[in-house]
C-alpha cells in the first residue's frame, strides 16, 4: 500500500518521485488571508522554480482541507531575479527539505520524511546541504529585512541527532524566509506525509532506516510520560493538555502493569529510538511523544491515551502513523483509570 490514507482524503496531486532541478530558484515565503465560502483560511507561497521560472509542483505542500494549514498558492511561472543584485547562490547540489519546523512532533513526522531519498544526489554528486522554507505555521515575515534573510538554521541538538540518523548529519541547513535563493542544482523529492491525511511508504522506509542504525534497548513495554514536560511548561495551556493528577495515575498504572516509564525529553534521540525499536508495546498520551512509535518494529502495539484536546477519540495523525508502520492501535479515553489499567495489562499479556 503506497499510502495510509484518512477516510475521504485524496492521494497526492503529483506522483511521488525525485527531480534534480538545474539552476533552481527558491522563492521567498509569503502568507496572507484567504476568504472562501464564509470561512477565513490562509494562503502561502514559496516553492521551487526551474531555470525558466516555471513552478516545480513537487515542491509544494498539498492542502487537504485543514483549516489550520495554509493553502499553497504559488504562480505557475515567475520572472527570475537574475543578474547583479540578485539573490545569493548556493553552489553544488542541495536537497529541498520542504518546510522547516522547530516543533519536535511536526519535525519528526513532517520535515524529516522529506529526506527519504538516500543522501547521495541524483547524478552521483554528494549533497552539499539542505534548503527549506521556514515553517508554514507561526508569524510570517512581513517584508524583507534584518532577521528575515535566508540564513543557516540554528539547530536544536535533537534536530541534529535526527538529521544524523537520516544520513544528513553535519550538513549546512539554509532556511528561506523573506528573501529568495538560487541553487546550482536542487534535488526535490515528493512529500510522503500530509499530517492528518496520509502517510506514505517512503516515510516509513526512512524511519525504519533511521531506527536500524540504533541498537534496541531491550525493554518490552515502554510508557512515554509527559509529566516532567508538562510540569516545566505549566503556564502554557497550549502545551499542557493533561492534569498533573492524571499524569501521576498513568505513571503508577503503567509501572504496575510492567511498563518501563520514561520521560523522553530527558533522553537523547538515540536513547529514545533504542527504547522504541526494542519495545513490543508502546503507550502514552496523545501527541508528539507518542509519534516516536514510528521507530518501533511492525507488529508493535501502540496504546494512545486521550488528553483534554481529544478526550474520547484518537488523533487522526496517530492512527495514520500506526497503520502505515504496521502497528496495532489501541485507545483509552482521558482520565479513565479502569480502562487504562485493563488495556495496559492486556497489552503486555498480564492477567486482567
Image (cartoon, rainbow, N blue to C red):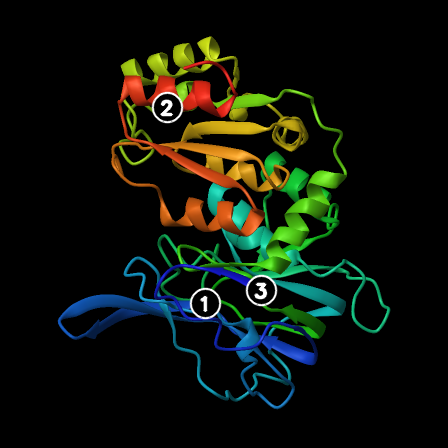
- Work out whether residue 133 or residue 11 is closer to the camera in this orientation and state it: 11
* Element on which disc 3 rests: loop
Q: Earlier in the sequence, mark 3 or mark 1?
A: 3
- Residue at 35 percent across and 18 percent down: it is 247
Q: Which residue is mark 1?
A: 29
The answer to whether residue 340 of the structure is visible from this angle is yes
Image height check: is 288 above or below 185?
above
Callout 2: few (<14), some (14-19), or many (20+) C-alpha neighbours within 10 Å? some
- Work out whether residue 50 or residue 219 is closer to the camera in this orientation and state it: 219
> Do labels 3 and 1 touch, CB within 8 Å?
no
Cα separation, mark 3 vs mark 2, equals 36 Å
- Work out whether residue 281 or residue 272 is closer to the camera in this orientation and state it: 281
Q: Earlier in the sequence, mark 3 or mark 2?
A: 3
Q: Residue 20, how many percent across, how many down? A: 71, 76
- Residue at 32 percent across and 61 percent down: it is 66
Q: Mark 1 or mark 2, which is nearer to you?
A: 2
Cα separation, mark 1 vs mark 2, equals 33 Å
Q: Mark 3 or mark 2, which is nearer to you?
A: 3
> Do labels 3 and 2 touch, CB within 8 Å?
no
Callout 1: few (<14), some (14-19), or many (20+) C-alpha neighbours within 10 Å? many
* Element on which disc 1 rests: loop
Q: Residue furthest right?
A: 124
Q: Which residue is mark 3?
A: 2
- Residue at 50 percent across and 45 percent down: it is 322
> Quadrant location of the N terminus?
bottom right
| Quarter of the figure with residue 95 | bottom right
Q: Which residue is mark 2?
A: 230
* Element on which disc 2 rests: helix
The answer to whether residue 232 of the structure is visible from this angle is no
Q: Earlier in the sequence, mark 1 or mark 2?
A: 1
Q: Residue 270, how many percent across, how many down? A: 68, 31
Q: Tell me, for residue 171, which label it has, or none.
A: none
Amino acid at each position: 500500500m503506497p499510502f495510509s490514507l484518512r477516510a475521504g482524503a485524496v492521494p497526492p496531486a503529483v506522483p511521488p518521485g525525485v527531480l534534480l532541478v538545474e539552476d533552481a530558484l527558491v522563492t521567498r515565503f509569503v502568507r496572507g488571508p484567504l476568504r472562501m465560502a464564509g470561512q477565513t483560511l490562509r494562503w502561502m507561497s514559496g516553492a521551487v522554480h526551474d531555470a525558466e521560472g516555471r513552478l516545480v509542483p513537487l515542491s509544494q505542500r498539498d492542502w487537504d482541507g485543514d483549516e489550520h494549514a495554509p493553502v499553497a498558492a504559488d504562480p505557475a511561472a515567475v520572472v527570475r531575479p537574475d543578474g547583479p543584485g540578485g539573490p545569493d547562490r548556493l553552489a553544488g547540489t542541495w536537497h529541498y527539505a520542504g518546510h522547516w519546523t522547530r516543533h519536535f512532533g511536526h519535525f519528526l513526522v513532517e520535515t524529516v520524511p522529506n529526506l527519504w531519498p538516500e543522501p547521495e544526489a541524483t547524478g552521483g554528486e554528494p549533497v552539499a546541504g539542505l534548503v527549506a522554507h521556514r515553517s508554514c505555521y507561526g508569524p510570517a515575515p512581513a517584508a524583507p529585512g534584518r532577521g528575515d534573510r535566508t540564513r543557516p538554521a540554528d539547530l536544536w541538538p535533537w534536530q541534529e541527532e535526527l538529521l544524523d540518523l537520516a544520513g544528513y548529519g553535519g550538513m549546512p541547513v539554509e532556511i528561506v524566509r523573506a528573501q529568495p535563493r538560487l541553487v546550482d542544482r536542487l534535488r526535490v523529492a515528493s512529500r510522503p506525509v500530509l499530517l492528518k491525511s496520509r502517510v506514505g511508504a517512503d516515510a516509513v522506509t526512512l524511519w525504519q532506516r533511521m531506527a536500524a542504525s540504533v541498537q534496541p534497548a531491550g525493554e518490552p513495554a515502554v510508557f512515554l510520560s509527559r509529566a516532567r514536560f508538562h510540569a516545566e511548561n505549566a503556564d502554557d495551556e497550549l502545551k499542557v493538555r493533561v492534569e498533573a493528577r492524571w499524569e501521576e495515575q498513568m505513571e503508577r498504572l503503567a509501572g504496575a502493569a510492567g511498563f518501563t516509564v520514561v520521560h523522553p525529553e530527558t533522553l537523547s534521540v538515540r536513547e529514545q529510538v533504542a527504547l522504541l525499536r526494542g519495545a513490543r508495546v508502546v503507550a502514552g498520551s496523545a501527541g508528539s511523544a507518542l509519534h516516536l512509535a514510528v521507530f518501533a518494529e511492525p507488529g508493535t502495539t501502540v496504546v494512545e491515551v486521550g488528553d483534554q484536546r481529544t478526550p474520547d477519540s484518537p488523533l487522526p495523525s496517530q492512527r495514520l502513523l500506526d497503520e502505515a508502520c504496521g502497528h496495532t492501535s489501541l485507545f483509552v479515553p482521558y482520565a479513565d483509570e479502569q480502562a487504562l489499567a485493563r488495556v495496559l495489562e492486556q497489552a503486555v499479556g498480564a492477567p486482567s
